[in-house]
Image (cartoon, rainbow, N blue to C red):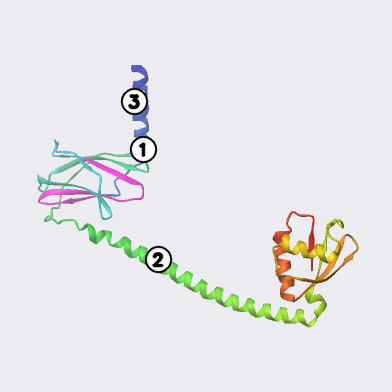
Amino acid sequence: MFCILTNCVLIALFLINIVQSDCNTSNLEFQIFKKGFRALLVDQQGIEKFEFHVEINKNVIENGQVTKKCGNYWVFEQKDVELKIGDTISYWAIFTKNKLGFIISKQSFIINEISDWEPLNCLKQADILPKVETSVCCQLYLNVSYRIVELAEENIQLQNENKILTELLQRDDYNARTLKVFGRYSLKIYSTAKSFVQSLIEDKLNLKDVKVVEAKTIPQDGVIFKVESSKDKVRVILAAQKGLDGSNYEINW
């Protein structure tokens, strides 16, 4: 059992070293003050935790673990340490990103500049994000508005085209109201071709108010029939596309 645990520890350390080899300090920033210092890790998508360890002139001070970010940074602050030019800061850090642990290996630098303490202004840094979101929302709103106007114009054009087509159909009364249906029907149930078509329109197409004016049989198990108006003809055509799908009947116009 001890061997198994030892192997697991070795594997875990090996995996950590792989992650460590891909890390750098380009996103880590220091602010050195006369008393105290601040370490800031630039926030990135997926970062969940930042833990910072530090030594001042080889003296270990309290470790810091940050679980909340300030504005666009994950921050560790130490306010009780007095610093001067020439002091050496050694550090290493761990941060979690996308459920993976990353190590910034131990590094050090000599302080050559010190400034007065400046408090963090988290609100000022965080204000950048809402401005971007507002800009995106406004752009989306404008895009939707433009599209609504375009659709309204397209709808007017389609209405005009439909009006012209309706008028052209009405000039030819026969073609404007005539359709054909193909498919066998039982003469025992339907005594006439008209009763068959009327039943088909009402039951299969669910058009209770469309009336068949006349109907007669034609070759190839067909029936040619006429409805009351060109508008009714259009309704039958549209309803048949769905209502007769998968059935033994087909309507042609």
Q: CA distance from mark 1 to mark 2?
A: 38 Å
**45 in the magenta segment:** yes
Residue type, label 3:
Val
Q: Nearer the viewer, mark 1 or mark 2?
A: 2
In this rendered view, identify the residue nearer to me: 142 or 224: 224
Mark 2 residue element: helix
Q: Which part of the image, by quadrant, shows the C terminus? A: bottom right
Which residue is pictured at 11% across the width and 48% down the height? 85
In this rendered view, identify the residue nearer to me: 152 or 196: 196
Q: Which mark is residue 19?
A: 1
Mark 3 residue element: helix
**149 in the magenta segment:** no
Mark 1 residue element: helix
Mark 3 and 1 residues: CB-CB less than 8 Å, in contact?
A: no
The percent position of residue 122, horizontal first and vertical second, equals: 22, 57
Quarter assignment of residue 214: bottom right
Query: Pointer 3: what residue?
Result: 9
Residue that protrudes farthest toward the right in the picture: 219
Query: Pointer 2: what residue?
Result: 137
Secondary structure mostly taken by the magenta-highlighted segment of the chain: strand
Q: Which residues are magenta?
A: 29-52
> Is 218 above or below relative to 14?
below
Mark 3 and 2 residues: CB-CB less than 8 Å, in contact?
A: no
Q: Earlier in the sequence, mark 3 or mark 2?
A: 3
Q: Residues within 10 Å of mark 3 (few under 14, many from 20)?
A: few
Residue type, label 2:
Cys
